[in-house]
Amino acid sequence: MTDRKNGGTAEVLVLGAGPAGLVLGNLLQDAGIDCVVLERAGRTHVQTRARAGFLAAHTVRILERHGLAEGLRRHGQAHSTCEFRTEDGRFRLDYSGLGRGERHTVYPQQLLVTDLLTRFLDRGGRVEFGTEAVAVVDPDTGSPSVTVREADGRPGRRRARYVAGCDGRHGAARRSLPPGSVRRYDCAHGVTWLGLLAEAPPSLDAVGYAVHERGFAGHMARTSEITRYYVQCERGTPAGAWSEERIWDELALRMRTKEYGPLHRGPVVQRTVVDLESDVLEPLRHGSLFLAGDAAALISPSAAKGANLAVLEAELLARALIDDLRHGDAEGLDAYSARCLTHIWRAQEFSHWMIALLHGPSGADRPSPFHEALRQSRLSSLRTSRSRQDWFAEHYVGV
């Protein structure tokens, strides 16, 4: 057990109990590697924070390969269709019959996190809830440590051979990167969404993308009783600024319910404001500190890539750490950053394409007939070109 009086030691300290941190923790634990997960929030919050819900085929394969897919197999819903609604009508793509013939599995992230956390703890894993990582100290050495704020508010320290930063874009891992050691690529897309979780059944059997002159609207099923909606709004709009009546009226207008049928309405139980931003850090290794998940790269939610990249990176990092700590083979650790960045940039490119497909010009480009005509051309090509549809399907599901 970790001895707090002596600062605590482990082979690997994992910062953050999200998908990346918990997949990594489970894989290390299965290999007999001593790891401790530090999580700022309490267990209830970790298991109930609603995030993404679309798992790529590759993500499902990773979870199945490591015995982490029991809940997913029981309760996940196969999904393979998206519907676009525009001023020129609507069209649907069954992407499971296009590209590589793969589909998504809908399984809310909070359920996946609960599965991963329960398995980790049931097998003797250690998660220190309410323990905030403050800084990673001496990451460029072979004996890094993490200063923490204990659950009771006192300062503390944990020591390890390696530290895995899975604690998001504002976490201690990013804050602790040595000056001049990293290059950051970032992009603010000039688009803001009001993200909504409604206690209402899905209104269509597809992911719905509505392109409208008033802005984008999106429909994503989560369960038989819960639906995720997104509606584009002005930047700076507070989450509570719109009444529920206005929300549903705006969704109905943009999703053209007069032409295609009404939405199932219900109480809006969660609201978040999402400014679409992207960034990538290079490299993802800094001595004994490794970045994964949103700590490695932030990707807009327009193409549901964030959780899928996190799981992929966690598996790559777990394999590399196991090879090094159990077999003295450091090749995987040396290659970790480059391997992850190949997938990250591919996902970023598709996400950027989706943003341009679904939203009108913003910022200095508004209004721009040229850019609007480009968007209409992209939609027309996606509607009519089999080669474009195959490309879309491969990148929409792939990571």
Image: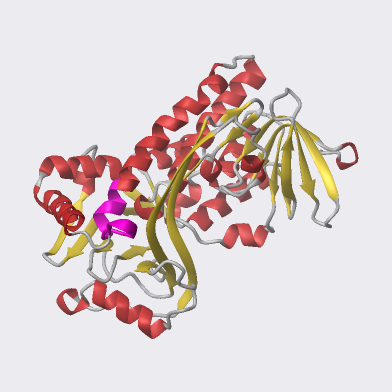
**Helix, strand or loop: magenta stretch:** helix
Residue at image position (31%, 43%) is 350
Residue at image position (12%, 49%) is 381
> 241 or 152, which lies in front?
241
Q: Is residue 352 left or right of residue 75?
A: left
Q: Residue furthest right?
A: 5
> 178 or 216, which lies in front?
178
Q: Is residue 323 left or right of residue 63?
A: right
Location of residue 334 by image quarter: top right
Does the rendering let one see residue 364? yes
Location of residue 77 by image quarter: bottom left
Identify the magenta region: 353-365
Where the C terminus falls, by quadrant?
top left
- The x and y percentages for residue 367 are 24, 63
- The x and y percentages for residue 115 are 56, 51
Magenta run includes residue 357: yes
Magenta run includes residue 99: no
Looking at the image, residue 64 lies above or below residue 249: above
Q: Is residue 204 left or right of residue 71?
A: left
